[in-house]
Amino acid sequence: MKRSTFVRVLAVVALAAAPSVHAQSGAVVAGSGPGAVAAAQTIKVTATITAIDKATRDVTLKGPQGDIAVVTAGPEVKNFDQLKVGDRVDLQYVEALAIELRKGGGLVVGRTSSADGARAKPGAAPGGSVGREVTIVADVVAVDPAHQAVTLRGPNRTVTLRIADPEQFKRIAKGDQVEAKYVQAIAIAVGPAAGK
């Protein structure tokens, strides 16, 4: 089995709501306007390092509820040797989705994605960030007023979606396009235990 990086495994543990690490705080923001809707959420988690296995690079974390998770720091974690039992691990996870109606179309139907990341500099406290953005453009190929639904044909498949807001639904016509942007970012910082 391939071992995941410290950043990815910790994010999965924190977000899967497994009993290992619980979110300490989070915020959800949503908004809409004519032909547009967006939502974003932020989750912050703090855990404490309770054990480190230098041979396997396994790091045991204790969450705020006392739950335990073991994550593996991959070779990407350049400052692994600086981790200490008692250190605090802060994770912040942000994701956002924005959907916009493009009247009359004109965009190329497709999917694009990009990713970026940063690591702590050699000798600095361990940490880093990873982010990605995915954009999908789809054609509106059918509008069903009886069910308040639209059918979208994207680059890989066709889906039919019910539009709950009648004001938004009446703006959509066959031949329009929908552009959806999904952004996800994770940042991790490791520091000494509080009071040190």
Image (tube, rainbow, N blue to C red):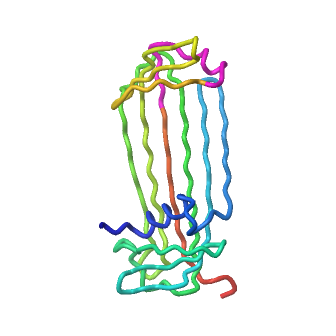
Side of 118 relative to 1 (left or right): right
Quadrant position of the N terminus in the picture: bottom left
Q: Residue extending furthest front?
A: 19
Q: Position of residue 21 (x, y in %)?
A: 58, 68
Q: Is residue 78 magenta?
A: no
Q: Position of residue 74 (x, y in %)?
A: 36, 73
Quadrant in which residue 19 is drawn: bottom right
Q: How many marks?
A: 0
Side of 104 relative to 191 (left or right): left
Q: Is residue 177 magenta?
A: yes
In the image, is residue 150 above or below residue 70? above
Quadrant position of the C terminus in the picture: bottom right
In the image, is residue 19 above or below residue 149? below
- In front here: 116 or 156? 156
Quadrant in which residue 97 is drawn: top right
In the image, is residue 6 above or below residue 53? above
Which residue range is magenta in the image? 164-179
- In front here: 44 or 67? 67
Q: Residue at x 58, y 77 (%)?
A: 62
Q: Residue extending furthest left?
A: 1
Side of 43 relative to 103 (left or right): right
